[in-house]
Image (cartoon, rainbow, N blue to C red):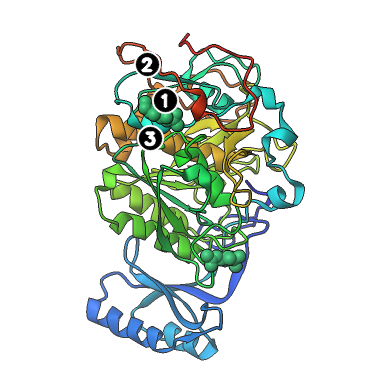
Amino acid sequence: MLLCAFIPLVSFALAVVLPRAEGAIDLPDTYLVKFKEGVEEAVREKHTEWVKSLERLNDDGTVARGLRFEFGLAFQGYSAVLDKEDLKVVRNSPEIAEIKGVGTSAPALTYLTEEKAVRFTDENVDPDIIQLTALDNVTDSKASQILTEKNKGWNTVRLSKRDYKPNGFNNGPWIHDGYLGQGVDVFVLDSGVNLKQPGFAGSKVVDAKNFVRGTNISDNQGHGTMCAGVIAGRYAGLSPKATLHNVKIADDDDRAACDSTVAGIEYVVNAPGKNNMKVISMSQTGFTGRPDVSTAVAAAVKKGVHVVVCAGNYDVDACGVQPSNAPGAIVVGSTNPNNIFPTKQTDREGTNVGRCVTIFAPGSGVPTLSTKNLDPNYHYFAWGTSIAAPQVAALIANRLSKVGAQTPEEIRNWLVGTATKNQIGGNLRGSPNLIAFSGVGEEGAGVGTGRFTAANKVPGLKKSADDSDKVD
Ligand SMILES: *[C@@H]1O[C@H](CO)[C@@H](O)[C@H](O)[C@H]1NC(C)=O
Ligand SMILES: CC(=O)N[C@H]1CO[C@H](CO)[C@@H](O)[C@@H]1O
């Protein structure tokens, strides 16, 4: 998902300084401030009231001075824009433990917009090889049957067939059981989601919260809609019955500020509903060298939320990158249709590796939705760990939908236990040889078929030559 290689920094202090991904920036005069542990609430409140009193807004609604966000999950604190005098006051406050600058994630989609790495069907692949089907009637069908659905993209085959043959896009069905995320809340923390995209018709996609001042909550960039499409899209989505919440943490250049991201994560933990039925899908990575995002992810997992993050596309050790180094996070790397993980020949296709990667999922040419082209005939094909992660979030949503609330540990054990093993070729460099698997059809249930009518096809896409819809 990231254009550039990252530049490791040498750490001088005892504290671990995480490397900075190129493209990530520091926000001017913006600080994350932590209270000392054990400081009385009244003292914190008084301090925070003072920060609030500094407020000055720019014309576009962004904060020129004063409070940005308050935090209370992994630590008590706030973020704020402070001038020199303000900063002096904060530094001299005995209740304050730590003050640091706020940086961002590295923007993801530069290559998409400038180099068109994600293209529509007709430009990029033979239109004969893909024909997406709508899930309208799956939504009506009873859960618990084993259903097959043709030609939803190679990724769905890879995720639901053990004996997947690495021979292109159209090599079998998507096998699922109809639960498809019903009753599960999936939170996409990204650049927003475009609810006007007709590919979400019939899905439960809602605007939840915008943590980026000066923008509207829609996706004006593309990355968030891309991630949401493969979860809740009517055609390309793997969990079309889930409720998908748009939590905007990245700006219209797809840069997520650390503080917006921590605020977004805290929002999910505090949102209504059982934490064990919530899934965060966050394809934002390369946060600059402060561990607060990883700390927030770990705290959310401790509170019972399932957190799925992308490994990053840099071809480096995921343990050196935020937030893929977060304890408890499910970290997703990327494989391609030939069952090897792509090396970074192109920016879009690399994957981070190593023991901090939990699992791999399809990350090359995965059908999903665009925020810009609202023509229902078209789907984007997306590349990178950014699109791999939401597919694993979707499998988790489907699992929760079927078995009910699970702890993050239970879900991790299931995901790793049911994964397809030892099919990835190439130099794994310490990564687990695991490809995500839906688990459907391996629990003694009878196998049936769910046919999809011609009416369900995406208009304008040619019919596939592959007529097989059986489970084999
Ligand atoms: C949201 O912001 C974008 C970018 O500034 C703008 O193009 C779009 O019209 C806005 N949408 C709404 C509904 O205000
Ligand atoms: C889109 C589509 O094909 N929907 C069908 C779902 O099933 C009902 C009843 O079986 C049909 O009437 C719809 O046309």
Work out whether 47 lies above or below 138.
below
**Do the residues bearing badges 1 and 2 touch, measured as CB atoms within 8 Å?**
yes
Work out whether 64 lies above or below 458.
below
Could you tell me the amino acid type at mark 3? Ile
Q: Which residue is mark 3?
A: 396
Q: Which residue is mark 1?
A: 438
Mark 1 and mark 3: Cα distance apart in space: 8 Å
SS state under label 3: helix
Which residue is found at the position 31% from the left and 11% from the top? Answer: 446
Could you tell me the amino acid type at mark 1? Ser
Which residue is found at the position 48% from the left and 32% from the top? Answer: 134
Q: Which residue is mark 2?
A: 441
Q: From the viewer's side, name the closer residue of 415 and 166.
A: 166
Q: From the viewer's side, name the closer residue of 268 and 472.
A: 472
Mark 1 and mark 2: Cα distance apart in space: 9 Å
* Quadrant of ligand 2 in image: top left
Please state if 301 lies on the left or on the right of 237 as rendered: left
Where residue 367 sits in the image (x, y, percent)?
58, 35
Which residue is found at the position 51% from the left and 91% from the top? Answer: 85
Q: From the viewer's side, name the closer residue of 227 and 98.
A: 227
Q: From the viewer's side, name the closer residue of 70 and 470.
A: 470
Which image quarter: residue 68?
bottom left
Which image quarter: residue 27?
bottom right
Mark 2 and mark 3: Cα distance apart in space: 16 Å
Please state if 128 lies on the left or on the right of 399 as rendered: right
Mark 2 surroundings within 10 Å by alpha-carbon count, few (fewer than 14), some (14 through 19), many (20 or more): some
Where residue 280 sits in the image (x, y, percent)?
40, 47
